[in-house]
Amino acid sequence: MDQLWAPWRMAYILDAKDAMDSERCIFCEKPKQQTDEENLIVYRSQHCFIMMNKFPYNNGHLMIVPYLHESDLTKLPDKILQDLQQVLNLSIKAVKETMDPHGMNIGLNLGRTAGAGIVDHLHYHLVPRWNGDTNFMPVISGTKVISEALSDTWRKLNSIFKKF
């Protein structure tokens, strides 16, 4: 059988293990660093920020994150919930304008059993979808093909978010 190499997957595995084993929270640390392009942060509001997923399911995979470190959606103050929804709406508009997807998946994974990789800091995922974006690659080789560099996607999205 031929091998398809995806060496970037090891970085994902090690980062995910680090995030789960560590007391540090990337959603608390990254916004403080003020290096938005390096940290893939494309937008900031008063209570939330938008960060590209470093290991995306699809091009344009975003995470909408409150600054408040909280795992329980019901404990977020109304002003943060409102901002979170408004920033999610901006994300939808920006992805539509930038990437023209055929659809989107939007959701929260609350708790490890529900699929949360970072359990203690809730965040929405927005994943653009296109007809035919699921193919044999993930099934046969466990590899997802991402057709655009993260830095290129960041520049496109960031320029759109600057308009808002």
Image (cartoon, rainbow, N blue to C red):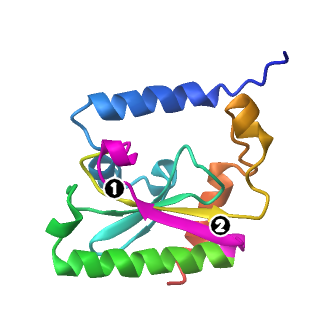
Callout 1 amino acid:
Pro
Horizontal side of residue 58 vs 140, given as left or right: left
**C-alpha gap between disc 1 and disc 2:** 20 Å
Q: Which label number is shown at residue 31?
A: 1
| Local secondary structure at mark 1 | helix
Locate residue 64: give its quadrant.
Answer: bottom left
In this view, the residue in front, 74 or 126, is 74
Callout 2 amino acid:
Lys
In this view, the residue in front, 81 or 97, is 81
At label 2, counting other C-alpha atoms closer than 10 Å, the crowd grade (few under 14, some 14-19, many 20 or more) is some
How many labels, in total? Answer: 2
Q: Position of residue 125 (x, y in %)?
A: 46, 60
Q: Which residues are magenta?
A: 98-117
Q: Position of residue 39 (x, y in %)?
A: 46, 49
| Disc with the residue nearer the chain's start (1 vs 2) | 1
Locate residue 154: give its quadrant.
Answer: bottom right
At label 1, counting other C-alpha atoms closer than 10 Å, the crowd grade (few under 14, some 14-19, many 20 or more) is some
Horizontal side of residue 92 vs 27, given as left or right: right
Magenta run includes residue 111: yes
Q: Which label number is shown at residue 156?
A: 2
- The structure residue drawn at horizontal position 65% and vertical position 71%, both measured from the top left corner, is 103
